[in-house]
């Protein structure tokens, strides 16, 4: 995949992720700020060629959010989504180190 596609995909994935953080917390201002920060981070990671890393982390966040959502508590949802993303980030680092670029 070429670099432009990686950049746009990274911006899309992390921008949506940031917006959803604001939606869960129920704050329009946070949705805008987190969406802009996510878009910026996604562009940088996409520019560096880390699409596989982004997809792994987003999958971990989604899995953690699904598990936390089942509890019915908003605080547990936020914590489990963050934990899922952190764990997936460590797994993604291992995948990147073994597969290389």
Image (cartoon, rainbow, N blue to C red):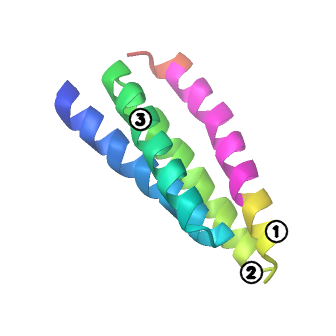
Mark toward the viewer: 2 or 1: 1
Q: Nearer the viewer, residue 74 or 6?
A: 74
Relative height, residue 64 to residue 11 (above, below) = below
Q: Main secondary structure of the magenta part?
A: helix
Q: Is residue 76 magenta?
A: no
Label 3 or label 1, whichever comes before in sequence order: 3
The residue lying at 27 percent from left, 34 percent from top is: 6
Q: Residue 12 location in percent, x, y?
A: 34, 50
* Residue holding disc 2: 70
Q: Quadrant of the C terminus?
A: top left
Helix, strand or loop under label 2? loop
Q: Which residue shows up at 63% across the image and 73% down it?
A: 26
Discs 2/3, front: 3
Numbered disc 1: secondary structure:
helix
Choose the circle earlier in sequence order: 2 or 3: 3
Q: Position of residue 60 (x, y in %)?
A: 61, 52
Using residue 45 as the reference point, say whether residue 78 is left or right of it.
right
Dot 3 surroundings within 10 Å: few (below 14), some, or many (20 or more)? some
The dot on residue 64 is: none
Crowd around label 2: few <14 · some 14–19 · many ≥20 (10 Å): few
Q: Which comes before the other along the chain, label 2 or label 1?
A: 2
Q: Which residue is mark 1?
A: 75
Q: Disc 2 to disc 3, how far (Cα)? A: 31 Å
Q: Secondary structure at mark 3?
A: helix
Query: Which mark identifies residue 40?
Result: 3
Q: Is residue 26 left or right of residue 51?
A: right
Residue depicted at x 70% and y 41%: 86
Q: Mark 2 near mark 3, Cβ–Cβ under 8 Å?
A: no
- Of the 4 image quadrants, the one containing the N terminus is top left
Which stretch did the figure color magenta?
A: 81-96
Name the quadrant containing residue 50. Answer: top left
């Amino acid at each position: 995949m070429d670099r432009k596609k990686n950049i746009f995909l990274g911006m899309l994935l992390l921008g949506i992720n940031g917006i959803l953080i604001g939606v869960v917390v129920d704050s329009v201002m946070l949705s805008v700020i987190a969406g802009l920060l996510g878009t910026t981070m996604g562009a940088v990671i996409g520019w560096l060629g880390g699409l596989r890393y982004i997809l792994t982390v987003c999958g971990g966040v989604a899995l953690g959010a699904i598990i936390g959502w089942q509890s019915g508590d908003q605080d547990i949802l936020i914590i489990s989504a963050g934990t899922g993303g952190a764990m997936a980030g460590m797994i993604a680092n291992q995948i990147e180190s073994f597969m290389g670029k």
